[in-house]
Amino acid sequence: MSTTRRRFLQAGLAGAAGLAIGRRGLAASETSIPVRAITRGPKHHWFAYYDKLQFDPTNRYVLSNEVDFEHRTPEPTDVINVGMVDIQDGDRWIELGQSRAWGWQQGCMLQWIPGSDSRVIWNDREGDQFVSRIHDVRTKETRTLPSAIYTISPDGRFAITADFARIQSLRPGYGYVGLPDQFADQKAPKESGIFRVDLETGERKLILSLHDIAQVPVSGEKVDQHWHWFNHLLISPDSKRFTVLNRWRAEDPATGKLQPRWQTRMLTASVDGGDLAILKLSTMISHFIWKDPEHISMWTKPLDKPDGFYVVKDRTSETTVIGEGIMTRDGHLTYIPGHPDWILNDSYPDKVNRNQVPYLFHVPTGKKVELGAFHSPLQYTGEWRCDTHPRASNDGRLVTIDSPHGGNGRQLYLIDVSGVLNS
């Protein structure tokens, strides 16, 4: 038996994590997949989004946010703690800093900087601007960049970011409170959009404006009369291109209020903002991940095709369905490091028991392995819901999820999937 699996068994497997059969969901022990809580109350812990590095290169330290309340929108005065869990030392909590720029769905963009074994980064608010903190967990030194970040290049040299005040004004819960949208009276401002940030110098440069993208029609129809924002940015594995969702909401001419629903298109471009490509899909695009430098996997509805997960070739409309008839619900997908045939994904709460199910899917064989069913109480809905957002360690052997199923509010859980990958 491996040291990792023995440690899980000593921790009490799913029993220690508070899993039970019935309303709370199927115990992970029923599937022989070890799981344990690595954070505990009274404070609440979560990492948030699924597409960022949560584990350090040794897979010993697991990043997390910490907060003392739930079930409401953050206020400008709300501060969260930023820290990491030492899963080889009794799941010891190590505090690293604080953040005043955060949300329930994506946290404060806390993540390890790729290529570094000791530096982490997160967003914060300082005076009248959003900033980011680069903290060395060994030396304890912290450096501040004069810009928030969204996604870090895999080579660790730069970030791509959006206007978080703009996002908050048009899609509350995905931006940050505390600062107003400077362009709240403009549908597609020239000075707001996507920025590139040098992680060494802090230099920030606008590379694609909302005004410019609003001038590009959709299927021959003008969209510059709508209210635009950018959200969900990711840089390709070779650090050469990025993808982003351009979203817009129409204004009701009778009331002047924005329509509750929005439309979406996916763009890709080089990391300097050039070589822009608009993927010719429908205006329904949800979660996505780069599969390799030329392909993006996502939940979408291609033209004349049903909803589902598809692999889309960059700069084209070429799509290939994945998980047909098996991965039938939208989820937060990534590829397991070192095991590119395996997809890690999850589901939203089902309508009967409100169970969330993270799972592994083997692309070549169509094999699906559920990692447990985790109950999400009814109060975890809307902006402050707690999606599991599964994330894999760098060697692919461990998975973390956020979940409120144990009765202690949202906490971090660690799942040993090495037995699945080796089976």
Image: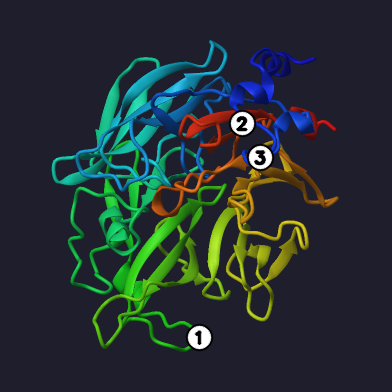
Q: Is residue 177 found left or right of 95 in the rendered image?
A: left
The foreground one among 263 and 189 is 263
> Which of the two marks, 3 or 1, is nearer to us in this view?
3
Q: Position of residue 35 (x, y in %)?
A: 66, 27
Q: Is residue 287 visible?
A: yes
| 128 w.r.t. 26: above or below | below
Residue furthest left as drawn: 127
Q: Position of residue 242 (x, y in %)?
A: 48, 56
The foreground one among 298 and 143 is 298
Residue under the point 20% across and 48% down = 178
The foreground one among 401 and 302 is 401
Dot 1 corresponds to which residue?
Answer: 219
Q: Position of residue 190 (x, y in %)?
A: 24, 69
Dot 2 corresponds to which residue?
Answer: 394
| 133 w.r.t. 1: above or below | below
Query: Tag 2: Cα neighbours inside 10 Å, few (<14), some, or many (≥20)?
Result: some
Q: Position of residue 162 (x, y in %)?
A: 34, 55
Between disc 3 and disc 2, whose residue precedes?
A: 3
Which residue type carries mark 2?
A: Asn
Distance (Cα) linking label 1 and label 2: 41 Å
Are the residues flagged by discs 1 and 2 in contact, CB closer than 8 Å? no
Between disc 3 and disc 1, whose residue precedes?
A: 3
Q: Secondary structure at mark 1?
A: loop
Are the residues flagged by discs 3 and 1 in contact, CB closer than 8 Å? no
Residue under the point 30% across and 57% down = 168
Q: Is residue 112 visible?
A: no
Which residue type carries mark 1?
A: Ser
